[in-house]
Image: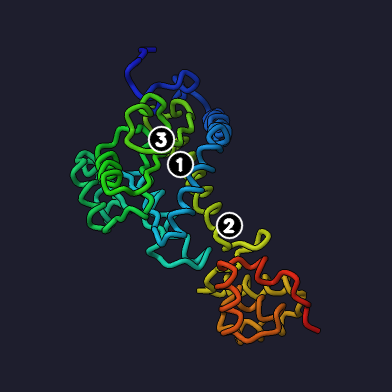
Amino acid sequence: MTTHRRLPTTEKRNPRSENIDERSTLEIVTLINQEDRLVAQAVARERRRIAEAVDVIVERFRQGGRLFYVGAGTSGRLGVLDASECPPTFGVEPTLVQGIIAGGRRALVRSIEGAEDYPEDGAAAIDKKHVKARDTVVGLAACGLTPYVRGALQRARDIGAATIFVTCAPEAVDSIPAEIIINPVVGPEVVTGSTRMKAGTATKLVLNTLTTTAMIKLGKVYGNLMVDLRAVNNKLRDRSVRIVMDVTGLSRRRAQNLLARAEGRLKAAIVMHFRSVHLPEALEILKENNELLRPAIAESPEPT
């Protein structure tokens, strides 16, 4: 095996899979699974930096800021995916969390790898989004070297935005232009350089944790229930009813009626129930409590 000392970890050969093409199907599947088990451990070692990043994101959200993910290839697609799932899950506006991918929307379904080579394009993407100092920009690059992402991060820093970077390459950490660097080291991939595998999984776990924890801190979750979801399909409409039933103890019919009176606003419906108020008063109570449901219904007598 040739040693490449100067290569980032994500580009090195994995000694455990050197002869993978000679193995049986079950052996290949087993090896991939064994390597995947390393991912959660690598992310766990970064939990303090992830928590620090969440606090920064939440602080900027409360100042009226937004969160931008910037990446190329797999990393870019993962950023767009996480951003696109926030509105239906947490009821936020689509502009609050946004994904920027090198090559634009076409790169979501077709590889446009050359688009990642120009830092000036990354900087231009930040300008196009009118990024402000109150925003947060998270760079995503498994190898830590992607010029497009680095150009975007540098531009964001020049503007004064908070900057975070997620990479699986420890070799790149010292040169990354970001205030917080989340570096889950998952080791070389089963197929050399195929960072859609362990590095992609690690990135997905980190992004899930960033936005989910931030939304919990913002009051989008009560207990472990998504009380700000947007019921845009039958599955979510049914979930809304079940959440109201779980929190209030109401029957399905009464929960449906309550949601109808709340114009489908799940969190407001719960406040209406516990505080015995109409929708306008419920919305005002939530506003007074920074949209946090628990204090909004605390010490309120349950209606009979």
Task: Calculate the distance from the C-alpha at mark 2 to the C-alpha at mark 3.
Answer: 25 Å
Q: Amino acid at mark 2?
A: Ile
Q: Secondary structure at mark 1?
A: helix
Mark positioned earlier in the residue sequence (2 or 3): 3
Asked if one can make out residue 26 in the rendered structure from this viewpoint, the answer is: no
Mark positioned earlier in the residue sequence (2 or 1): 1
Q: Amino acid at mark 3?
A: Thr
Coordinates of residue 249 in the picture (x, y in percent): 77, 74
Coordinates of residue 276 in the picture (x, y in percent): 70, 84
Q: Which mark is residue 203?
A: 1
Residue 51 lies, with reference to residue 185, above or below; the image says below
Q: Amino acid at mark 1?
A: Thr
Asked if one can make out residue 278 in the rendered structure from this viewpoint, the answer is: yes
Please state which of residues 26 and 237 is positioned toward the viewer in this rendering: 237
Q: Secondary structure at mark 2?
A: helix
Q: Which residue is mark 3?
A: 167
The image quadrant of residue 221 is: bottom right
- The reply to whether dot 2 and dot 1 touch (C-beta < 8 Å) is no
Q: Which residue is mark 2?
A: 216
Coordinates of residue 196 in the picture (x, y in percent): 41, 39
Q: Which mark is residue 115?
A: none
